[in-house]
Structures are given as C-alpha cells and as structure tokens.
Amino acid sequence: MINKIKTTFLSLDQQTKKIIKTGIKFCFAICIISLIILLTYDFAFGNPNLFEIGILLFKISMLFSSEFLICGIVVDSIKKHLI
C-alpha cells in the first residue's frame, strides 16, 4: 500500500507537481498567518474574535492543502486516462 502511494507521487506530471507545491506553500503561508493571529490573541488581547479568526484560518489552510494534494492526484490520473 505504501509503495503504491509512493509510486503515485513519483509518477505525477511535472506541471501537476508544480501546482501542488505552490498550493501547499500558499496554504502554509495562511497557516503561519493564523498562528500569528492566535499568538496575538494569547499574549496581547483577549478578544474572542481573534481566536475565532485564527482557528478558522487554520482550518481553511488545512482543508485547502488536502484539497490541492487530492485534486492534483485525481487530475493527473484523469490526464493519464487511469480513471
């Protein structure tokens, strides 16, 4: 099973790999922003809105990163006529 996942990642098209990497970098940037907001909430202000914004941004970044990864694999499989 692990070997199949590894071969799937290694056989991705170069353009698809580039899109996935760029998307995950973007999601990582959103995650860093959310962590900064959460640290601001923890140390400076006790505003519950900052907490909600930070948590929502963190959830969105995790969701988008998984979407980039899964959709990239599916699109590559469709391009190669495997699905």
Image (cartoon, grey):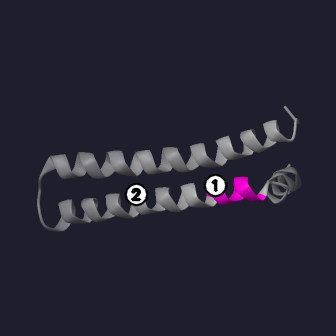
Region in magenta: 14-20
SS majority, magenta: helix
Residue 40 placed where, x, y %? 20, 64
> In the rendered structure, does residue 66 fall within the stretch colored magenta?
no
- Total numbered labels placed on residues in the image: 2
- Find numbered disc 1 in the image and state the secondary structure of the residue it sits on: helix
Determine whether, in the image, residue 26 is placed left or right of residue 38: right
The numbered dot on residue 8 is: none
Q: CA distance from mark 2 to mark 1?
A: 15 Å
Nearest to the eye among marks 2 and 1: give it: 1
Q: Quadrant of the C terminus?
A: top right
Residue 73 placed where, x, y %? 73, 45
Amino acid bearing label 1: Ile
Q: Which residue is pictured at 85% across the width and 55% down the height?
A: 11
Residue pointed to by mark 1:
20
Residue 82 placed where, x, y %? 88, 36
The numbered dot on residue 30 is: 2
Residue 43 is drawn in which quadrant?
Answer: bottom left
For this orientation, the residue located farthest to the top is 83
- Find numbered disc 2 in the image and state the secondary structure of the residue it sits on: helix
For this orientation, the residue located farthest to the bottom is 43
Determine whether, in the image, residue 30 is placed left or right of residue 45: right
Amino acid bearing label 2: Ile
Q: Which residue is pictured at 16% across the width and 48% down the height?
A: 48
Q: Which residue is pictured at 25% across the width and 65% down the height?
A: 39
Query: How crowded is the residue under tag 1: few (<14 C-alpha within 10 Å), some, or many (20+)?
Result: many
Compared to residue 27, the image places residue 44 above or below, namely below
Q: Which residue is pictured at 29% across the width and 65% down the height?
A: 36
